[in-house]
Amino acid sequence: MAIMDIIKIPDPVLKTVADPVAEVDDDVRRLMDDMLATMYDAPGIGLAAPQVGVLSRVIVADVAKREATEDHPEVEPEPIFLANPEIIWQSEATSDYEEGCLSIPEIYETVTRPAEVTVRYLDRDNEEQELNCSGIMATCLQHEIDHLNGVLFIDHISRLKRQLIMRKFTKAKRLAEAG
Ligand code: NI
């Protein structure tokens, strides 16, 4: 499994809508495995293919470690692989969560999203699945599905805060390129 480079804002690929996969074949499985290795390495709890420069509707996630920190510090990995994920139901109840993103390092902001969602997707074996989830998994999957639509978590916060963050990263990129 290969560790891939994670793309940061303001790269336009992060604002691009990704294409569905025709099926989960060996190529997609290889992408999923590389994305999972990249996510664990980062470390993060979710990763979408556009973040590694692939405009396919593929995400990986593993919230087990994050959920486990309170009562069970030692937990087995529980990776989940999703292709063409769609939110087919969402609760009216919302929850607030302080989100971050591997493409926007060191920035954390509170985002309000539906507290519970049902997601339909193709799994690693190309089987259709439906997953109902709440808590951090619901937040994580909504965040990752947003990535497939060119939407970032900072698109859910105030315009002023978003502009400050974008300006900071645009300036850092310019300095890196100049240096
Ligand atoms: Ni993200």
Image (cartoon, helix red, strand yellow):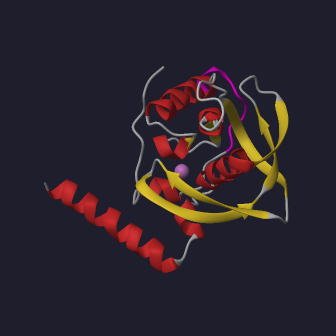
Tell me if 166 is positioned left or right of 90 in this view: left
Q: Looking at the image, is 3 positioned above or below residue 96?
A: above
> Where is residue 68 drawn, in percent x and y?
64, 34
> Where is residue 122 drawn, in percent x and y?
77, 34
Q: Which residue is at 56% across, 61% downward?
A: 153
Q: Looking at the image, is 130 positioned above or below residue 7?
A: above
> Where is residue 26 drawn, in percent x and y?
63, 20
Tell me if 76 is positioned left or right of 44 in this view: right
Task: Write the start and end of the magenta stretch as one range.
Answer: 20-27
Q: Looking at the image, is 165 positioned above or below residue 35?
A: below
Quadrant where the image shows the C terminus: bottom left
- Residue lying at the far front in this picture: please name it: 71
Based on the picture, tell me whether residue 79 belongs to the magenta stretch: no
- Which residue occupies the foreground of this view, 169 or 108? 108
- Which residue occupies the foreground of this view, 94 or 152? 94
- Residue lying at the far left in this picture: please name it: 179
Tell me if 92 is positioned left or right of 22 in this view: right
- Which residue occupies the foreground of this view, 98 or 173? 98
Tell me if 110 is positioned left or right of 82 in this view: left
Secondary structure mainly formed by the magenta segment: loop
